[in-house]
Amino acid sequence: MKRQCLTSRGITLLESGAGQACKWSVHILSGADMRQALTKTHTFTYNRSVPQKGIPVRGGENKMNSREKWKIKSCPSEQKERLANELGISQLLAGVLINRGIDTREKGEIFLNPEKFEYLDPYLLPDMRLAVDRIIEAISKKEKIVVYGDYDADGITSTSLLLMILGELGADVDYYIPNRFSEGYGLNAKALDSLADKGTQLIITVDCGVKSLDEIKEINSRLDVVVTDHHIPGDELPEAVAVVDAHRSDSRYPCPELAGVGIAFKLCQGLWQELRKEALGDRGIELVALGTVADSVPLIGENRRIVSVGLKAIEKTSIVGMKALLEVAGCSDKKITSTHVGFYLGPRINATGRLRSATIGVELLTCDDPEKAAQLAAEINSINDERKKLKDDMQLEAEEQLKNVDIDNRKVLVVVGNDWHQGVLGLLASSLETKYYRPVIVISMKDGIGKGSCRSIPGFNLYEALDRCNDVLEQFGGHEGAAGLTIREDKIDEFTNLIEAEASRQMTPEQFIPFYDLDQEISPLEVNMEMVEELERLQPCGMKNESPLFCCRGVRGAYASLIGNEQQHLRFSVVDGRKSITALAFNMAADINDISRIDTEPLDVVYEFNINEWQDTRQLQCFIKSMGTPIGDEVEVKPDRVFLKNLYIFLKECKTKGKRVTNDAEWLSVRMRLAGIHAQGEACAAGLKIFEELGLLAVDSSGTLQLVEGTGKMNLQDSPTFCRYNEL
């Protein structure tokens, strides 16, 4: 008996004999033989450009070979049936709700009807009474009030909201937002002194202040400070008149996930109720929804009510600046969703603080003159275009740098650019993290000092990691998923090694496998328009209430074509001989041949549903997120002949492509699984040991595996490890 397995480079591993007395030999094919062999070759691929859930790969990556886990949520059919009957909904929607923790009739009615959800009492927030009383005193005494905001969309909308409401309440109010580059985040001591010199008597912070202990203590003798913030306080609170923050340890507020603009909104509710003796209602709710979605806070609880009402208010807004923003973003006369806010409106407002001054954003959102608003919106649109180009140019530089990095064996990616724009570092870090599924640290170096922005993946606590690297950092701050740092140029190499070791300490190799969280395994052809329309009741979607994501194995595709300005997208039909549904796959143009061929294999797809509305027609379609065969959970693999053959082929292909393989069996197992090969850490360790015993493999001083050429024929039974595992 003779079996053979071929790689695309013509390496043949022949297994001859039968039963236990099996011998292997390694041969190189001739040119003619190789050409013939390639027609039957299956190449194992390792595509690192794999997205997290719901995030498309940019840059036209070929996603057919992407590899990720499918984590399919499940709930008992009886539970789905019960909830469906109680709420009068389909079992499909009931299952999606249960996956989100909405498992009772009461929870379901509140979740599915967020606009009926009453706003929570603002006085449930700690120090709200103190804050309201001090501001009312300032208004009655005609004191000078300054709203001190942050330079992102949350801070800009918070500032704009307070200016609007305080103005209507008769306050003498102005605002101040620090410059990202010269003053940095939070309260700035020099700025506070300057404001006091100009006669300011009360500062109201929005989206900042809870950690500005020294700055507030220093200015206390000159003016009063009311802090409203949504960030997690430290062990000590600032010595302010009031600190309104739902994350305080003594807070009992039912929705601690409010954005900064949400906290500002609660303050406005309290003030309006006291001074006007009526509820604030939904005044300014457009601004609150914009800031809430842009800041990516969980869209649950009160946030869900805010955004649900706010999105409808944006469509019909009377805010002149909001109308101008909708126009330049191409969102006028559209049904506004959280997607429009997250991808079109929010980034434009954020761009002002990233590249210029956040005051431009406040000027727009508080502008009453349509002509002036149109000019400001056009300027903001231009800034946003500049932001996109800057990010793309920086990413090209970063990608060139990564060509010289052993990404296959790196757990954290660190890239350093010369004078990269600091306002775009976070966007670049997020983009690289999405593409490579690694924690990423992007550093801009100038005059020997680097400013860095960091983004993480699930399982790696950035703040904890940076804290353990504190000795080589000038300063750092942030949280588990995102952080910033300052570092000297001569410390970067040491920092890179320390953060890499920290990733090895915190994470297992298994955690570096990308994954999709999926609501259900169901064919797109099993779902009708009514069911998808019902799923729209989940809106607004966002963090902790993501758009429902489904999967299906063995899908048949047909009638593929390219679409888009640069023919970068793919459209095809999912068919079963009786029915069909249109599928769109963004940035997957390279996969068209895999769908168009007559002999194409069925596809394993991850997708979400969408209703396309055009010229008074509605058509059901699905957005394809992935067409790669999913990686299963790790299972026991025996180091038998089949596995050893696959291991050898993988090592040989890595050598041919110049990809380094280290003597780390668990990491090797993950790399093989990403390449579509069944593997397990123990089996890899045994396989490497077997190859060493046979003289086929050596490990150099750096821990790199080296295949030994010219070994000739070998008998597996010459390896004690092989005999032990295979009971020979």
Image: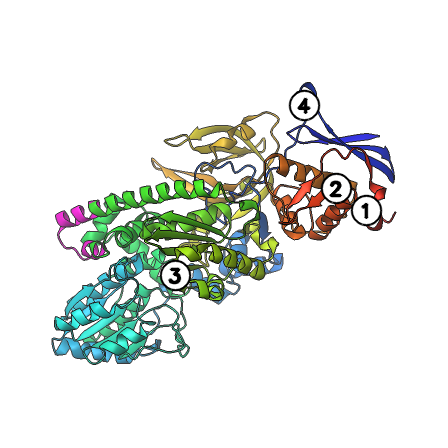
**Hey, what amino acid is under mark 3?**
Arg
Q: Gap in Å between the C-alphas at discs 4 and 3?
A: 61 Å
- Is residue 315 visible from the viewing direction of this image? no
Front-lying residue, 283 or 409: 409
Relative to 673, residue 653 above or below:
above
Q: Residues within 10 Å of mark 4 (few under 14, many from 20)?
A: some
**Hey, what amino acid is under mark 1?**
Phe
Q: Which residue is mark 3?
A: 304
Q: Gap in Å between the C-alphas at discs 1 and 3?
A: 59 Å
Q: Earlier in the sequence, mark 2 or mark 1?
A: 2
Mark 4 lies on a secondary structure that is helix
Q: Gap in Å between the C-alphas at discs 2 and 1?
A: 10 Å
- Report the residue at 48% width, 63% height from top: 469
Mark 2 lies on a secondary structure that is helix
Q: Earlier in the sequence, mark 3 or mark 2?
A: 3
Q: Earlier in the sequence, mark 4 or mark 2?
A: 4
- Report the residue at 66% width, 48% height from top: 669
Mark 3 lies on a secondary structure that is helix
- Is residue 567 visible from the viewing direction of this image? yes
Q: Earlier in the sequence, mark 4 or mark 3?
A: 4
Q: Position of residue 304 (x, y in %)?
A: 39, 61
Which of the two marks, 4 or 3, is nearer to us in this view?
Answer: 4
**Hey, what amino acid is under mark 2?**
Leu
Q: Which residue is mark 1?
A: 722
Q: Which residue is mark 4?
A: 34
Magenta span of residues: 361-378
Q: Which residue is mark 2?
A: 644
